[in-house]
Image (tube, rainbow, N blue to C red):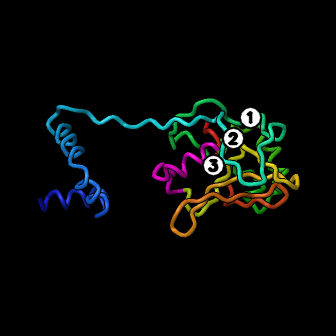
Amino acid sequence: MNQLADALEAAGYTPDDVTKMRSKPEELTQFKAVLIGASDIVAVKHVIDCDCQPFVPENWEVCEDDQLASRVTGQLEWDAANIGLFLSDTQKSGRHEGNELRKELESQPALPANLLDYLLEHPHLIPEEWKGKYVFFWGTIYRNSDGDLFVRCLGWRGGRWCWDFGWLGSGWRGSDPAAVLAS
C-alpha cells in the first residue's frame, strides 16, 4: 500500500484525488480491469461548437457585422498543440491600439469566445504557459449598449482561471496575445 501511495504522489495525485477514488469503488473496479488487460482507457475528445452562441455579458451583444472574416467556425477538437498565441510586432515592442490590432488579425484564424467558455468549464485543458497572460478570443467581438466594441479574454487571477475583457479603443500589450489556430 505504501508503494501505491508513493506512486500516486509521484504521478501528481493529491489527497483530494485519493478521496474521490475512495468514494467511487466502481471506478476502482474498472481501473483493475485495465491493470489486468480486460479494459482499455480511451481519452476523452473535447469538441467545441464554434458556431453556437457564446456567453454574452449583460447589456452586450454579438453583432455579426463586427466579426473578423477569418474567425474559426464549425467543430473544433481541442488540442493545445494546435493553438497559437499571436502577437503583432507592435505589441511585442509596446502597446498596440485595439482597432488597429483588429485589422492585423483579419488574416489570422482567430478563435471564438465559445472556446474561452469551454476552457473555463474544463480548466485542466488550459496550458500552464498561459498563466501571466491575458489570452484574447478575437473570433467573437462584442458590442455594449454604448456601441463600444470589446473582446473577452482568459486570465489567471486569484489562483483560478476567469474571463475578463478588453476595449478595442485601448492599448494591447505583449502579455495580451490572440488565441489562433496554429499553422
| Within-10-Å neighbours for mark 2: few <14, some 14–19, many 20+ | many
The residue type indicated by label 1 comes to Ser
Q: Residue 154's spot in the image, x, y percent?
A: 62, 55
**Magenta stretch bounds:** 114-129
Tell which circle, 2 or 1, labels the residue nearer the N-terminal end: 1
Q: Which residue position is annotated with label 2?
A: 110
Q: Which residue occupies the extreme front position in the image?
A: 58
Q: Which residue is pictured at 28% across the width and 64% down the height?
A: 15
Kindly report the distance in space between the C-alpha atoms of the residues bearing marks 3 and 2: 10 Å
The residue type indicated by label 2 comes to Ala
The part of the image, by quadrant, that contains residue 63 is top right
Q: Which residue occupies the extreme bottom position in the image?
A: 158
Tell which circle, 3 or 2, labels the residue nearer the N-terminal end: 3
Q: Which residue position is annotated with label 1?
A: 70
Q: Report if the CB atoms under discs 2 and 1 are less than 8 Å apart.
A: yes
Asked if 150 appears above or below 82 in the picture, the reply is below
The residue type indicated by label 3 comes to Leu
